[in-house]
């Protein structure tokens, strides 16, 4: 039974609930969403000769008792909606009745109070007695999910009230940073998780994970990494004020649209400073300068010869890497290897060359989660990098004939690689696959050594210096166009 069918079922169910919160069930938009949901439900039910049971327990989804770890991460918001309606399981039996699905959707959207029992769709018929997310990655995943939830709440509050509090942000980021520092190899793998529907939230958390890992690699201490992580997580908070039609515009932006986009760093920095709290100077500086470029030719333009701060330059590299490797409504995703090439080409112009070199050294030429086709035709997913080894470590997941197989560990030399392919186009979720592949211990033990002392300047990360620089930067914007 395909986990992809479960994800499609959950995706369409989430879309239906969202539409029903906006429109009545007989509205054309609701009807389109309902019909798509019915198709996904029937496809899932038909994928098994037995009943299909989706269980909910401990903030995780289960399929017939088997943990769906990364499905749970992607659909954490839907989990909360279902839990709020006291749903513990959804059982599909046979070809689901259309009228039942429509009633289920209205029940979950709180348009009706009851859902009948005994049909082809049944609620709370099954119970998970011992299903738990007890894997080695569970704490890190839980922290990741918590930060995504914090961002959702923050986004809604800023959109509604124009303000937010820094305390919950620092608490959520602190927990994620603590977990990621203890398992940096797993954190880098987790940063491959993507969500097309909630790009901004997942992009922000992935940027945070990679920026913290890079900072740790450069030798920055723990107390500095938490505010850097907060800044990475909030770097795009100013986009709340930009209309979705501009953010998702499929073509080239006109002058007025581009002007609205280029103001988001100032808006974000000002919102963070207004929120106050420990670490807000660091976060405000990052939000303001993450598009300023190493050579100062980005936006906003800053007066004087002062370069963007070290923390801004550090986050900028992670920000661009994740953006390039993620599919957007107006642009296809690029492979991790291609993203590293773009960073290297921009070193000295867009990006700090020392940080680019450190980032590539940390990630490796083929970062964890990369999907590679070998000259012999097999498909391999890279799991981790072993310090001191020139071989790539991963698992074979597909034969040369295109047959999916149980993952088999492999060590390969670079000269055996034919090409890198997009994980999405290959139908692979790297983090989920590798966690099931039996290489967890190697991934957890794969933290890279730090670069040599003094490889990158690390001065000026104290809060007072950042506070002064943030104040100067905010008052010295000379060109918003």
Image (spheres, rainbow, N blue to C red):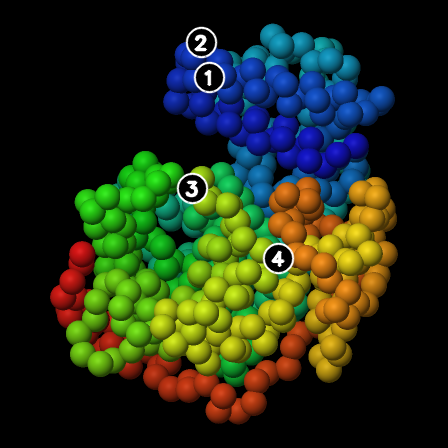
Most extreme residue toward the bottom is 453
Give the spatial CA distance, label 4 vs label 1: 34 Å
- The residue shown at (73%, 55%) is 373
Residue neighbourhood size for the residue with mark 2, other residues' Cα within 10 Å, grouped as few (<14), some (14–19), many (≥20): few
Give the spatial CA distance, label 2 vs label 3: 31 Å
- Of the residues under marks 2 and 4, which one precedes in the sequence? 2
- Of the residues under marks 3 and 4, which one precedes in the sequence? 4
- Of the residues under marks 1 and 3, which one precedes in the sequence? 1
Look at the numbered discs 1 and 2 and tell me whether their residues touch, using CB distance below 8 Å. Answer: yes
Residue at image mark 3: 330
When the figure is inspected, residue 313 is found, relative to residue 378, above or below; the finding is below
Where's residue 60, x and y in %? 66, 42
Can residue 139 be spotted in the picture? Answer: no
Look at the numbered discs 4 and 1 and tell me whether their residues touch, using CB distance below 8 Å. Answer: no
Q: Is residue 283 left or right of residue 99?
A: left
Q: Which image quadrant for residue 320?
A: bottom left
Give the spatial CA distance, label 1 vs label 3: 25 Å
- Of the residues under marks 4 and 1, which one precedes in the sequence? 1
Q: Is residue 130 left or right of residue 313?
A: right
- The residue shown at (77%, 58%) is 374
Residue at image mark 4: 190
Q: Is residue 448 left or right of residue 15?
A: right
> Label for residue 26?
2
Quadrant of the frame with the N terminus:
top right
Q: Secondary structure at mark 3?
A: loop
Residue at image mark 1: 30
Q: Secondary structure at mark 1?
A: helix
């Amino acid at each position: 039974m395909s986990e992809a069918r479960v994800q499609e079922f959950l995706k369409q169910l989430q879309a239906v609930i969202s539409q029903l919160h906006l429109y009545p069930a007989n509205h054309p938009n609701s009807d389109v969403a309902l019909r798509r949901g019915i198709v996904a439900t029937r496809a899932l039910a038909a994928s098994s000769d037995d009943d299909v049971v989706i269980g909910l327990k401990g903030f995780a989804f289960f399929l017939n008792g088997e943990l769906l770890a990364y499905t749970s991460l992607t659909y954490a918001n839907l989990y909360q909606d279902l839990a709020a309606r006291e749903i513990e399981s959804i059982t599909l039996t046979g070809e689901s009745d259309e009228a039942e699905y429509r009633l289920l959707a209205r029940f979950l959207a709180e348009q009706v109070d009851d859902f009948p029992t005994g049909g082809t769709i049944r609620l709370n018929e099954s119970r998970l007695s011992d299903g738990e997310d007890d894997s080695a990655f569970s704490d890190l995943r839980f922290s990741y999910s918590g930060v995504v939830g914090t961002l959702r709440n923050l986004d809604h509050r800023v959109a509604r009230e124009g303000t937010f509090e820094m305390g919950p942000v620092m608490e959520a980021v602190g927990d994620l940073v603590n977990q990621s520092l203890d398992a940096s190899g797993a954190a880098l793998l987790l940063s491959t998780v993507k969500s097309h529907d909630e790009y901004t939230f997942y992009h922000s958390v992935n940027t945070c994970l990679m920026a913290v890992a890079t900072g740790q690699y450069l030798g920055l201490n723990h107390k500095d990494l938490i505010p850097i992580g907060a800044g990475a997580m909030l770097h795009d908070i100013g986009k709340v004020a930009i209309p979705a039609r501009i953010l998702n515009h499929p073509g080239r932006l006109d002058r007025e649209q581009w002007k609205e986009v280029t103001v988001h760093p100032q808006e974000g920095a000002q919102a963070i400073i207004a929120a106050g709290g420990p670490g807000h100077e660091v976060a405000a500086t990052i939000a303001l300068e993450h598009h300023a470029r190493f050579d100062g030719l980005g936006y906003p333009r800053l007066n004087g010869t002062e370069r963007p701060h070290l923390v801004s330059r550090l986050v900028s590299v992670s920000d661009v890497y994740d953006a390039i490797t993620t599919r957007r409504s107006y642009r296809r995703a690029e492979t991790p290897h291609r993203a590293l090439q773009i960073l290297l080409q921009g070193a000295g112009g867009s990006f700090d060359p020392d940080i680019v070199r450190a980032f590539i050294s940390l990630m490796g030429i083929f970062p964890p989660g990369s999907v590679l086709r070998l000259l012999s035709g097999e498909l391999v997913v890279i799991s981790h990098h072993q310090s001191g080894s020139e071989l790539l470590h991963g698992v074979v997941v597909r034969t040369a004939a295109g047959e999916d197989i149980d993952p088999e560990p492999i060590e390969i030399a670079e000269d055996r690689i034919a090409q890198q392919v997009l994980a999405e186009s290959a139908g692979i979720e790297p983090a989920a696959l590798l966690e099931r592949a039996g290489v967890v211990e190697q991934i957890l033990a794969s933290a890279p050594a730090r670069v040599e002392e003094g490889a990158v300047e690390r001065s000026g990360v104290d809060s007072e210096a950042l506070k002064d620089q943030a104040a100067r930067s905010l008052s010295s914007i000379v060109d918003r166009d």
